[in-house]
């Protein structure tokens, strides 16, 4: 079975160590994508996960890559190989999936953009582990057992690092970041819909800054 290269592992590590908090971004108006991502970047967040949850996701990835060449811009909510190919063409520098399929795991081994596969059980983790994956998104974190589940997974999988997402808030992120097997946490608390609707970019930079201060207190 082809194994994940060290280069891919290093690239994912680079994503997870660049920012302890990763915004999960859903673009409802394409014109919001660049100012929203600039606000997050100015607030200190250099890793941006743009989801494919709306029709604007792909175009947003391309625009944000051009506007913020020093940020790491990835694609989230990728669920198929077709989408994986599309986001690579759009310029995604990393790819995040909510779950795993054998096909996506195999594709991620040879793809250009490294994969952070999503898992919520030991069995799913093992599917990725045999391909060489050592970094996983833990999703949906809060309902899949939260901090207690991650502590339990550290026993059988001491070589695995997680990025939990799903139901995490600014005031709970630190509980996850205290764990040795958590490198970063992701969430949409960094991109509140009301602030985006109001184009209150300054407020979004403030949330980013405050979240980084809270997160770094745990490192
Ligand atoms: C994800 O895809 O990572 C989650 O939907 C983010 O979860 P949240 O919206 O509860 O933060």
Image: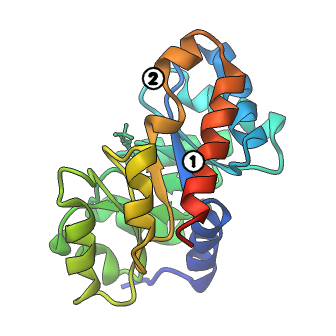
To which residue does mark 1 refer? 211
- Badge 2 marks a residue whose secondary structure is loop
Q: Residues within 10 Å of mark 2 (few under 14, many from 20)?
A: few
Residue at 27 percent across and 72 percent down: it is: 150
Q: Position of residue 200 (x, y in %)?
A: 66, 17
> Mark 2 CB in 8 Å range of ligand 1?
no
Query: Looking at this view, is 65 or 216 the one in front?
Result: 216
The answer to which of 166 and 117 lies nearer the viewer is 166
Quarter of the rendering occupied by the N terminus: bottom left
Q: How is the image coloured?
A: rainbow
Q: Is residue 154 left or right of residue 144?
A: right
Residue 130 x, y percent position in the rendering: 31, 84
Against 115, residue 93 (above or below) is: above
Residue at x 61%, y 64% (from the top left corner): 216
Residue visible at 49% across and 62% down?
115
Label 1, residues with CA under 10 Å away: few <14, some 14-19, many ≥20: many
Q: How many marks?
A: 2
Name the residue that disc number 2 marks.
54
Label 1 sits on a secondary structure element that is: helix
- Is residue 167 toward the left or the right of residue 37 in the image? left
Nearer to us of marks 1 and 2 is 1
Nearer to us in this view, 84 or 141 = 141
The picture quadrant for ligand 1 comes to top left
Q: Is residue 139 above or below residue 87?
A: below
Residue 77 place in picture, x, y as percent: 40, 42
């Amino acid at each position: 079975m082809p194994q994940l290269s060290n280069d891919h592992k290093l690239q994912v590590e680079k994503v997870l160590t660049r920012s302890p908090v990763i915004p999960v971004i859903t673009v409802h108006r394409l014109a919001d994508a660049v100012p929203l991502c600039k606000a997050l970047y100015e607030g200190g967040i250099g890793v941006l996960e743009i989801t494919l949850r709306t029709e604007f996701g792909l175009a947003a990835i391309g625009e944000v890559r051009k506007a913020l060449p020093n940020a790491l811009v990835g694609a989230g909510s990728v669920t198929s190989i077709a989408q994986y190919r599309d986001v690579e063409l759009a310029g995604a520098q990393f790819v995040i999936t909510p779950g795993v399929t054998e096909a996506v795991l195999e594709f991620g081994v040879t793809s250009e953009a490294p994969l952070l596969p999503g898992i919520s059980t030991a069995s799913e983790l093992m599917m990725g582990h045999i391909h060489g994956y050592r970094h996983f998104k833990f999703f949906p974190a809060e309902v899949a057992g939260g901090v207690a589940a991650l502590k339990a997974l550290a026993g059988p999988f001491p070589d695995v690092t997680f990025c939990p997402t799903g139901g995490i808030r600014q005031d709970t992120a630190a509980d996850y970041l205290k764990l040795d097997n958590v490198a970063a946490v992701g969430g949409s608390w960094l991109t509140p819909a009301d602030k985006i609707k109001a184009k209150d970019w300054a407020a979004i930079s403030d949330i980013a800054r405050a979240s980084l201060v809270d997160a770094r207190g745990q490192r």
